[in-house]
Image (cartoon, rainbow, N blue to C red):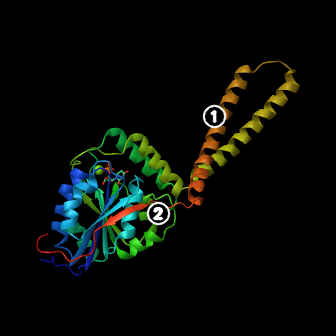
């Protein structure tokens, strides 16, 4: 049965990055197939195995053999979620493309609603968490701060609380695939390409099986990646700080010289000396660090290494669903 919408897509691709998700996929894949077959004539589910160590691929073999519309792309090792998403998007052939997590925190039941928005002409529908209650206080504060920093970029603003659960039109995915950078900060790239994008609120359920792989330190890394990929204000900040401090030093220098001529050469100021040395060493290290972050990014980009490597691909994709689905 096809849901009646003003415009329904002929083909849908669903991209799911998977890292040690054997247990979750056993639940997600059947649920997803049940929803997708009501939405389009033909669909494919592209599972990108991001170097899992829990036999994700073996566990899925029976399903893969039974349903040719399931595709498994095995990456040669763990490249990270962003790379896995890129691999999946590159393989997706559908007119409408959906990206979602494997842990059922992105409920398939939301897909008809998202598609409805697409049929009204929205080119990218991104699911936005109505709450972050399931996350720790520290993570929530961290993310808040991160979005604040990102808003200073002057570029396209990142919608807050939007994750990688999205439905996109073909044109959006084609645009994403054209972006050549190695640093795939997807949240930023999604915002950068523009198009008609609209949010859709949802209540995220708990992760079904397993644990989230994102640790605080990794999140910090991730935030730095985003910041350096989309903003250059830290560089500007450092040079402004430098100018300000030079100005202050000049005034203080003048003061010392005048003091010398007025009061004679009295040896004193040890405290001042140490404070100034420590302060300037700190500022120096900070500036070199900021500069280094950007140089590091440049280094990674100029190496021109591929974002991911595919080891094997199984499944046919965009096949007609059979009655047994
Ligand atoms: N994931 C991946 N590669 C990784 C880490 C995670 O493909 O190196 C996938 C994971 O299987 C899941 C999604 O990315 O489908 C989100 O991961 P997770 O639930 O651990 O993150 P969170 O929901 O906490 O952001
Ligand atoms: Mg999750």
Visible in this render: residue 59? Answer: yes
Give the left or right position of residue 168, taking residue 30 as reference.
Answer: right
Visible in this render: residue 158? Answer: no
Give the left or right position of residue 13, taking residue 82 as reference.
Answer: left
Q: Which mark is residue 156?
A: 2
Mark 2 residue CB less than 8 A from any atom of ligand 1 = no
Q: Nearer the viewer, mark 2 or mark 1?
A: 1
Q: Quadrant of the C terminus?
A: bottom left
Q: Which mark is residue 69?
A: none
| Front-most of residues 81 and 135 | 81
Q: Secondary structure at mark 2?
A: loop
| Front-most of residues 154 and 298 | 298
First in residue order: circle 2 vs circle 1: 2
Q: Secondary structure at mark 1?
A: helix
Quickly name the residue at label 1: 282
Q: Quadrant of the N terminus?
A: bottom left
Q: CA distance from mark 2 to mark 1?
A: 33 Å
Q: Residue 274 location, x and y as percent?
A: 70, 24
| Front-most of residues 179 and 153 | 179
Q: Residue 71 location, x and y as percent?
A: 28, 67
């Amino acid at each position: 049965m096809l849901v009646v919408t003003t415009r329904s897509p002929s083909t849908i691709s669903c991209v799911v990055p998977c890292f040690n998700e054997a247990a979750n996929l056993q639940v997600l894949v059947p649920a997803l197939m049940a929803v997708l077959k009501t939405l389009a004539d033909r669909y494919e589910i592209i599972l990108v195995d991001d170097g899992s160590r829990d036999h994700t691929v073996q566990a899925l073999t029976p399903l893969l053999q039974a349903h040719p519309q399931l595709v498994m792309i095995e990456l040669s090792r763990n490249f990270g979620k962003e790379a896995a998403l890129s691999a999946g998007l590159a393989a997706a052939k559908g007119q409408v493309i959906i990206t979602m997590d494997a842990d059922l925190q992105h409920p398939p039941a939301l897909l008809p609603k998202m598609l409805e928005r697409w049929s009204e002409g929205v080119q990218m529908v991104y699911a936005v968490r109505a709450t972050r209650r399931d996350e720790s206080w520290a993570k929530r504060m961290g993310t808040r701060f991160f979005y604040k920093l990102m808003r200073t970029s002057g570029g396209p603003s990142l919608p807050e609380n939007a994750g990688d659960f999205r439905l996109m039109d073909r044109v959006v995915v084609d645009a994403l695939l054209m972006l050549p950078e190695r640093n795939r900060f997807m949240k930023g790239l999604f915002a950068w390409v523009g198009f008609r994008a609209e949010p859709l609120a949802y209540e995220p359920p708990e992760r079904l099986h397993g644990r989230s792989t994102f640790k605080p330190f990794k999140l910090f890394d991730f935030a730095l990646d985003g910041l350096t990929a989309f903003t250059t204000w830290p560089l500007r900040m450092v040079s402004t700080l430098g100018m300000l401090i030079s100005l202050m030093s000049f005034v203080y220098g003048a003061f010392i010289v005048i003091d010398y001529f007025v009061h004679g050469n009295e040896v004193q100021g040890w405290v001042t000396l140490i404070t100034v040395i420590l302060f300037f060493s700190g500022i120096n290290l900070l500036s070199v660090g900021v500069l280094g972050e950007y140089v590091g990014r440049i280094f990674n980009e100029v190496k021109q290494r591929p974002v991911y490597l595919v080891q094997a691909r199984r499944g046919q994709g965009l096949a007609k669903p059979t009655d047994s689905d």
